[in-house]
Image (tube, helix red, strand yellow):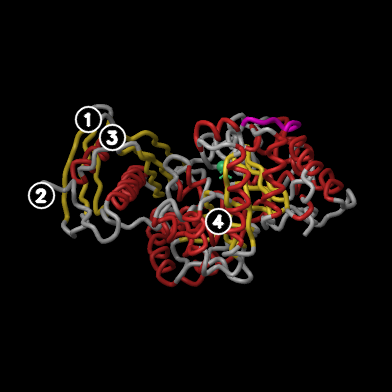
């Protein structure tokens, strides 16, 4: 095998490293929904999880392997520390995948060896090839990562990599685990590996990096120029601490600046052959899906997918763009799938028109999902005359959330005003099927609603983030509410959209509480530890 592929391989780790963001926890069905979207996006590899970490992770990797890891689908990868237990568990979870990959890792920096692993360099030099060979006894496709490679002694790193390749690793991934490196240093490290590891031509060089100094994408692009051919990244750049390198930024940088990057891949500078397999028109939709399901908001000025990324505010810019787009735009909003806000449907639109437009937008819903989405659409259409693509997307993202509805919001009513004390009444259906009503006074209408809901649900929690944003312009716009709450050091997110922001706020809160509640009471156990007092 050669480490010079003709294009860049995109390895998506949204479901593994991305899911390690505080509060981004996804359930199995949500992971499956994202995995399907990643397959549509055209990523080459999906790192679906860390099966040894928990039974939930195992189940998610197994389901993704079965449903998305088909012969024509992406490679499905599972993470494993360099131990037999981890590797065997990863192999078992990957069994249904047509193209399984085990990604095993062990740290190589002295800091990690001394304080975390309590192992010597000599021991790591033994363990790495032994565990690669063990992984190879389960699957053909083995990736090896020397964790904290950036802070490792390069000479030692070269030796570990050489042994891992000799034992059968076909991808060598170089992680900047702590987001410490700079572009020229990282480029030099990749070049050093190419020049000093004798068997490096038998493996693809991959890079993985965190964004602690905001340099992850720049580091990766420099790595590409020096021989890296696989990029490990996440949608919206979510991940541990400051996150991982953002997939959309890497893909669009390689797309927009293809003439600059082509020669580094041995192509003529003017070649128009895409550098990645990603269908860029799926980027925006995938970004929104990941943001809604993880509750990790995308900042408005985020490159590529932020709401301001294609907006021109200044008069000079607007004038220039109207005269010729290229004056201030380096890429077209449509290239990431950001369609103009077309008014497509209204309250008289039938199921067929609804289904057809969803199909055109790339949503594939089951019959039952379509039915409930259609009911939600009619409710919105009753209040809002014109339904745009963005409204449709908000409705669908709301409907396809896979959180078990343990508590269901049946009614929310508020009274507030500048001379009134904000008061809310809510009725919730509980997991046992009874309807409980309670009321509360708050500092504002949303506070009152949340206090009333808390009086019913009785799970102590702290609201740490609340945000509301409108889906489209106009007085009748739908509002999208995203919240994050903390319970016993864990963070849970909730999301909902509605034309009434108080209703959206209430539903987002119940959504987060349902996530919390299902985490407290995994399937099979009664989820009622906090429901002590019955109310009429
Ligand atoms: O950041 C890191 O080093 C990792 C490894 C497991 C690749 O996520
Ligand atoms: Zn990482």
> Vertically, is 382 above or below 67?
above
Q: Distance between the residues labelled 3 and 2?
A: 23 Å
Helix, strand or loop at disc 2?
loop
Q: How far apart are marks 4 and 2 (CA)?
A: 47 Å
Which residue carries the number 4 mark? Answer: 343
| Residue at horizontal 28 percent and vertical 36 percent from the top | 445
Residue 526 picture quarter: bottom left
Q: Distance between the residues labelled 2 and 1?
A: 30 Å
Which residue carries the number 3 mark? Answer: 447
The tag earlier along the polypeptide, 3 or 4, is: 4
| Residue at horizontal 50 percent and vertical 31 percent from the top | 115
Please state if 377 lies on the left or on the right of 487 as rendered.
Answer: right
Give the magenta-colored segment's residue range.
180-185
| Residue at horizontal 87 percent and vertical 47 percent from the top | 263
The tag earlier along the polypeptide, 2 or 1, is: 1
Q: How far apart are marks 1 and 4 (CA)?
A: 38 Å
Query: 3 or 14, which lies in front?
Result: 3
Helix, strand or loop at disc 4?
strand
Query: 275 or 434, which lies in front?
Result: 275
Q: Does the magenta stretch include residue 287?
A: no
Which residue carries the number 1 mark? Answer: 420
Q: Where is residue 142 in the image (x, y as percent from the top left)?
A: 63, 57
> Dot 2: few (<14), some (14–19), or many (≥20) neighbours within 10 Å?
few
Determine if residue 96 is in view: yes
């Amino acid at each position: 095998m050669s480490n010079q592929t003709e294009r860049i391989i995109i390895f998506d780790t949204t479901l593994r490293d991305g899911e390690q963001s505080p509060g981004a926890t996804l359930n199995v069905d949500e992971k499956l929904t994202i995995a399907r979207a990643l397959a549509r996006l055209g990523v080459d590899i999906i790192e679906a999880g860390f099966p040894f970490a928990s039974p939930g992770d195992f189940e998610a990797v197994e389901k993704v392997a079965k449903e998305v890891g088909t012969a024509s689908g992406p490679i499905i990868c599972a993470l494993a520390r360099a131990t037999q237990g981890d590797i065997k568990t990863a192999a078992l979870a990957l069994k249904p995948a047509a193209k399984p990959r085990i990604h095993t890792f062990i740290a190589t920096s002295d800091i990690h060896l001394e304080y975390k692993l309590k192992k010597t360099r000599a021991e790591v030099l033994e363990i790495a090839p032994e565990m690669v060979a063990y992984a190879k006894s389960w699957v053909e496709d083995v990736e090896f990562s020397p964790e904290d490679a950036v802070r490792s002694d390069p000479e030692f790193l070269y030796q570990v990599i050489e042994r891992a390749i000799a034992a059968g690793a076909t991808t060598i991934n170089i992680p900047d685990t702590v987001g410490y490196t700079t572009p020229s240093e990282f480029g030099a490290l990749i070049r050093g590996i190419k020049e000093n590891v004798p068997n490096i031509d038998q493996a693809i060089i991959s890079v993985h990096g965190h964004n602690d100094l905001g340099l992850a994408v720049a580091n990766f692009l420099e790595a590409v120029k020096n021989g890296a051919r696989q990029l490990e990244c996440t949608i919206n750049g979510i991940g541990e601490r400051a996150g991982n390198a953002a997939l959309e930024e890497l893909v669009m940088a390689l797309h927009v600046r293809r003439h600059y990057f082509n020669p580094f891949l041995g192509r003529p500078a003017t070649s128009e052959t895409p550098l990645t397999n990603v269908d860029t028109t799926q980027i925006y939709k995938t970004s929104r899906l990941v943001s809604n399901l993880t509750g990790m908001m995308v900042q408005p000025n985020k490159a590529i997918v932020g709401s301001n990324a294609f907006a021109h505010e200044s008069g000079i810019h607007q004038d220039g763009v109207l005269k010729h787009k290229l004056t201030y735009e380096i890429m077209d909003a449509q290239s990431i799938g950001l369609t103009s806000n077309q008014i497509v449907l209204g309250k008289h639109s039938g199921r067929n028109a609804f289904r057809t437009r969803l199909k055109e937008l790339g949503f594939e819903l089951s019959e039952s999902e379509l039915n409930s989405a259609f009911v939600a659409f009619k409710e919105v259409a009753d209040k809002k005359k014109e339904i745009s693509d963005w409204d449709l997307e908000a409705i669908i993202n709301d409907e396809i959330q896979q959180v078990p509805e343990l508590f269901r919001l049946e009614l929310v009513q508020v009274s507030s005003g500048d001379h009134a004390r904000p008061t809310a009444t809510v009725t919730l259906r509980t997991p046992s099927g009874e309807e409980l009503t309670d009321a509360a006074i708050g500092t504002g209408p949303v506070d009152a609603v949340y206090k009333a809901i808390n009086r019913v649900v009785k799970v102590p929690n702290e609201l740490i983030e609340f945000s509301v944003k409108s889906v489209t312009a106009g007085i009748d716009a739908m509002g999208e509410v995203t919240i994050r709450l903390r319970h016993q050091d864990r963070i849970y997110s909730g999301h909902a959209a509605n034309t009434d922001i108080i209703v959206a706020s209430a539903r987002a809160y119940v959504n987060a509480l349902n996530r919390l509640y299902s985490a407290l009471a995994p399937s099979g156990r009664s989820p009622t530890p906090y429901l002590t007092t019955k109310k009429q």
